[in-house]
Each structure stands twice: as structure tokens, then as C-alpha cells.
Image (spheres, rainbow, N blue to C red):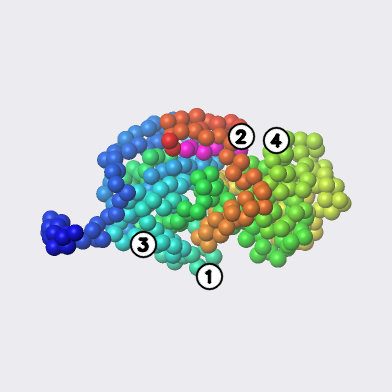
Amino acid sequence: MDTNNIEEIVRKILSDMGGKSSVSAPRSAGAIPEKARVAMLVEKERFELQEYKIPELGDDDILVKVEGCGVCGTDAHEFKRDPFGLIPVVLGHEGTGEIVKMGKNVRKDSAGKDLKIGDKVVTCMIFADDPDITMFDLNKQNVGKADVYGLIKPIGDDYFTGWFADYIVIKGGSTVFNVSDLDLDSRVLIEPCAVLVHAVERAKTTGILRFNSRVVVQGCGPIGLICIAVLRTMGIENIVAVDGNENRLAFAKRMGADKSVDFRNYKGAEALGNAVKETFGGHFADFAFQCTGNPIAHANIYKMIRNGGGLCELGFFINGGDATINPHFDLCSKEITLVGSWVYTLRDYATTFDFLKRAQAIGLPIKELITHRFPLEEINEALKTNLSMKGLKIAVINK
């Protein structure tokens, strides 16, 4: 091999590049289309697939080819009623995909793990305006006030701001995690699972939730079912699930609940509370998780908790209305310790990766939460399926 020729070729290439080395240019996986599709919510209950030019990346940006995204209740509320006033908007914040292009400054993810082309990633928060929120924030701030991919309007001429799309542009200052060691279904479930990892961490701050606690989980939608799974991976076994759907109660037992109560069989909060007590062998719950987002359910759950017990309320991600309780009987005289939970901290988000691995290792059917899969072209049907309460977790999976 003539090394002189090779050196000459290299010098010519560098000269043609204006003296710049390839390290200073964005790195990419090869051919990337000039344009790609997004699912734009153009009016209530109607997405429209629109095509836009993929913007040039900044030095700190990442272009991700979307593989899939879960449909959240927040997406369904925005689809149905536009409570956040975001229309037109590209929704989807439970997404994951593969890095196909990176700005020259991108080297590590938010946990310090190396990033390269082809890695599988998740993200949903943008912290450019709040640099105090970090992985190791001692104040354990949740990220509820940060911007969320999938719940923001287009940024200039960048319409790739939500995961219901072919591609998404992750801007510098955002959180991003390398999750290449997890399969697609697990990656789609990371965001909702992080919500429950955080809720259980909030519950532990009360000092009441322990290994041998009697725990009631009210509401067996995806959030309540994941809550049961998180508790079970911690070794808590005495769990009673409360819901009004036989299929969901059956799945709750597969996820780790010991027993279940169908609220349809009881009239009034007192009767329901006594049914939970009987199910626990004559004891009220030491701790309760309220996961329904229903104000009446919140009022009812105090009747299920023992004196000196604890409650974590995490079901209200939008304003669901006022709940009516009697502060004397429900809270004060029983000395209930109440904590609220809202999304997660960055540390909770990273902890979730280990939770998913642990849940699968002990045989919990966590990935079976995804009951319906739709291609991007059928996103309107995906959201309608979510609103109809069919199945459990709905996902949009790109071809």
C-alpha cells in the first residue's frame, strides 16, 4: 500500500473541507431525508400528517428517528378538549428512538453515559431555562415546571417537537438518556413508570410505607397497575387493588396485587372502606395510593386507611375538579399523612431503567401493559381507542 498516496488523499479531503476536520461537523448515520412527517393536531379530535423540512442541527442538538411513543392520558385530554390551548401542536412525550445525527458537542447523556450514532434514547424535558435542576439535585425538585417534548408549540421553523412523528429534534439543554440495553416496549413504558417510581419515593418520605405494610391501590389503569408493580419489586406483597373493571383487577393480581375489591359491589364510601378492611383480614390499609384522577375516588379513599396511616395522591395530572372531604373525620382525627406526587425528578427517571429490568426479572408482565399498537398513519384511531378505555396502554409504533 502506498502510504504517500493515502496521505495525499487525506490532505486533499481536508483542503476541500476548508481545513476543518470531520470531528467538528455534525455526525450522522448516513442518508437522512430532507423532509419528514409529523402528526399535527390541527383541531380537537383530528390529527393531520404534515411534512416539513428537517431543520439544521445546532452543535448541541440530536436528531432521533422515532421508533415508538405511548399515548398518555394527557395526550387524550389535549386531543379531546385542548385544555392547554396548544393547538396546533405535535403531541407525544412517552417516546423513544434511535440517534441518527448529533451536533459536534454531543458526547454524553444526562447521566454521563456515552452517546453515539445508533444508540436508543428517551427524553421529554427541556431545562435550558432552569439549570438548577440536575440529576443530583439535593432539593429533589420534580420537573413539572419544565418544558415537555410533545406539549410545546413548534420552535421557529422546527416542527419536530413531539414524538408523534417520523423524527424529533432534541435541543441542547434537554435531558436525554441512553437506553440501548432496553427493548422497544420497555422504552415506551419508561416515562409512565418514572411517574410511579417518583410516587413511591414520595410515599417513603412519610416513614409509613414499609416492607410489611398493608397497601391499597385505587384505580387499575396503567398508572395504578404500574404502581402495584413498583411496590412488588420492592418486596411489598400485601397489596389490595380497587377498581370497577374485572379484567383490570385480574391483571392487577398478575402485576403483584394479593387481593382485589370491585367497588361496583358496594354502595357508599363507608361500605367500600369496610370491604377493604375485610380483605386485609380486619385491618384498614397502612398506606394508600390514589391513582384515578376522580375527585369522588379521592374523597372515598380516606375510609380505607387506618389511624396514623398515609396517602399518596398522584391521579390528577389535569384539573379534575374539587374533592369533598371532612377534614376532621378524614384527615385530622385520623392523623393521616398526605403527600402529593407530580411527575418525577431526573434521578427517578434514571432509576426507572433498573425498575423495568427488575420487574421483568421477577416475572411481572410489565410489557403486556401495551395492549394496542397503531402506526403513525392511524394516530386518530389510537387516540380514540385510548378515550374509549379499551385495553390498557396504547402505543404508536412507527414502521
Residue 313, position in %: x, y? 65, 52
Kindly report which numbered mark, 3 or 4, lies closer to the viewer in this rendering.
3
For this rendering, which residue is in front, 198 or 355?
A: 355
Q: Main secondary structure of the magenta part?
A: strand
Q: Residue visible at 26% across and 49% down?
A: 56
Q: Amino acid at mark 1?
A: Leu
Distance CA(mark 3)–CA(mark 4):
46 Å
From the viewer's perspective, is the residue at label 2 or at label 3 nearer? 3
- Which badge, 2 or 3, is on the more N-terminal residue? 3
Q: State the separation of the CA atoms marked 4 and 1.
A: 41 Å
Helix or strand or loop: what does disc 2 sit on?
loop
Q: Nearer the viewer, mark 3 or mark 1?
A: 3
| x 39%, y 36%: residue | 40
Q: Amino acid at mark 3?
A: Arg
Which callout, 2 or 1, points to the residue nearer the camera? 2
**According to the image, label 1 marks what residue?**
138
- The Cα atoms of the two marked residues, 2 and 1, are separated by 39 Å
Q: Which badge, 3 or 1, comes first in the chain's sequence?
A: 3
What residue does disc 2 label? 391
Q: Do the residues under discs 3 and 4 have CB atoms within 8 angstroms?
A: no
Q: Is residue 280 left or right of residue 107?
A: right
